Image (cartoon, rainbow, N blue to C red):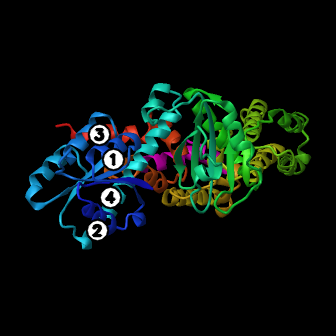
Amino acid sequence: MYKVIIVDDESWAIRGISNAFDWEQYGFEISGQFTSAYKAWEAIASQEPDLVVTDIRMPEISGLDLMKRAKAHGIDTEFVIISGYAEFEYAQEALRFGALDYFLKPLDVDMADTFLEKLALHFSRRSAARNHLLLDALTSADEEEIRRYLPAGSNAGCCRVLAFHYEEDRPKPAGLLKLDGLPVQLLEVETGTSTLLAVLMTEQKSELEGITEEWPAGASSPALPVVGISSIGSGLKQISKLIKEADLAASRVFVDEVSGAVHYSPKLHLVKPCIDELQTIVHGNQYDSIETYTLGLQEYFRLHELGMSEVVYLWNQAVGLLISAYPEELRDMELEFLNYAELKERFEDLESLCSFLHDVLTVLRQGNSRALQEGDILSCFNRMVAYIDRNYEQKLYLKELSVQFFINQVYCCQLFKKNLGKTFSEYVAELRIRKARGLLKQTDLSIENIAIQSGYVDYYYFNKVFKKHCGMTPAKFRKREAERSSRP
């Protein structure tokens, strides 16, 4: 809810403003009503509300002076001015000083919904922009940059991050964590259409331990399928690392269906038997056990409750082992080292990843003797590429596409490198980033909407991919392009 303070030296005018608009319907909450401009200023300074609706002419401090004071103190509050017809010049002056809007007395009730809808849209866009800048700062490990976006007086002696992955209603971390009365500051950051980070900051480590350890694992809710909980770090520079830990913990759903709290607890040592078994298959030429091995991987991970950290370790160890043993045979099969975000983008789940490894090992067993025919297979591949060109905004997995177009997914990888000079992942990413760049330059859509329209549900991952391709975040790219276009 956006917090609103109403200021007018006439109490009847305050009642009129409060009652004429359906504030709650549009996401606003009236947190203060004042006939004294001095008391209103104290509330503005302490609460830093999102919006102040104020009369422009009052006996103590004018609405214009309230606005100037807020700007001078660095308070990022928007102002809407109430003006009588005889005072319209004052309203114009307020607009020049940065007031968001104005409306005239007496209030036109018929315009109330239109007015609030316009305000709600503005605050939604402003909130999205702030959210993206805050996320950029938190993941930068730059303490000075992070402090720019934290509320004044924030104490980050100890920090912990929770990553919420939900399907229905957006969760409310403050209520779920029972923070009332605790000296813990909560910062919420949305990272996608169904993902939310809660950054907890306080002075005492024990206060963060108690909050999450009382939260039972497996406590499911339709609105809260899984919550990844990081370790406890000290200082703002640790937040970037803690965000990664929390997201890795929540990404346990890649391996198995889970719900409730999942603590970050890497168990990389338990993956070693899986790597040893793969090494035996490859170097001992025991390819008859491929089926047993790949099915056994999935069961092993579920049995030992392994998560995304272990999936990343398994994949990268397997890639290193395979390309070392068969550098020529596997050169064009899109076997490359990936981080957890890249793995989630490429594979739907652990089963899909194991299926790809199965196909790679099958090709090795066959000695890569199957020749790619330029006729039917190339025709199927061209249809696949045309389909990708039309549907890259959707979720695409190579395994599903290979089934749809009747080409083994390993041979798909070879065809991409042979015919397009890039991997499947690189080809899709280039299409998506090209569209995102165009939308950033040509529209005023929020960056989150641009990410979705370009094929990325997770803004956090979109941010990373965009920065990798363009050398800067989407927000900075948009700012640079706007500055370029405004130059004479």
Q: Nearer the viewer, mark 2 or mark 3?
A: 3
Residue 168: where, in percent of width, then height?
Answer: 60, 63
Give yes or no for contact between labels 3 and 1 (Cβ–Cβ under 8 Å): no
Residue range highlighted in magenta: 412-436
Q: What SS does tag 1 mark?
A: helix
Q: Disc 2, disc 3: CB below 8 Å?
A: no
SS class, disc 3: helix
* Residue depicted at x 46% and y 46%: 433
Q: Which three-letter amino acid code belongs to the residue tagged 1?
A: Lys
Q: In the image shown, does 414 or 291 lie closer to the viewer? A: 291
Instruction: Reply yes or no: does residue 183 show up in magenta.
Output: no
Q: Using the image, tell me which numbered label, if any, was put on residue 154.
A: none
Tell me the tag on residue 441.
1
Q: Tell me the SS state at disc 2.
A: helix
Q: Are marks 4 and 3 in contact (CB under 8 Å)?
A: no
Image position of 58 (left or right of 387): left
| Front label number (4 vs 3) | 3
In the image, residue 420 lies in the stretch drawn in magenta: yes
Q: Which residue position holds label 2?
A: 112
Question: In the image, what residue occupies the spot 52% across and 56% down?
Answer: 392
* Residue projecting furthest to the bottom: 110
Q: Earlier in the sequence, mark 3 or mark 1?
A: 3
Q: Does the image show residue 275?
A: no
Kindly identify the amino acid type of the residue bearing the numbered disc 2: Ala
Q: Are marks 4 and 2 in contact (CB under 8 Å)?
A: no
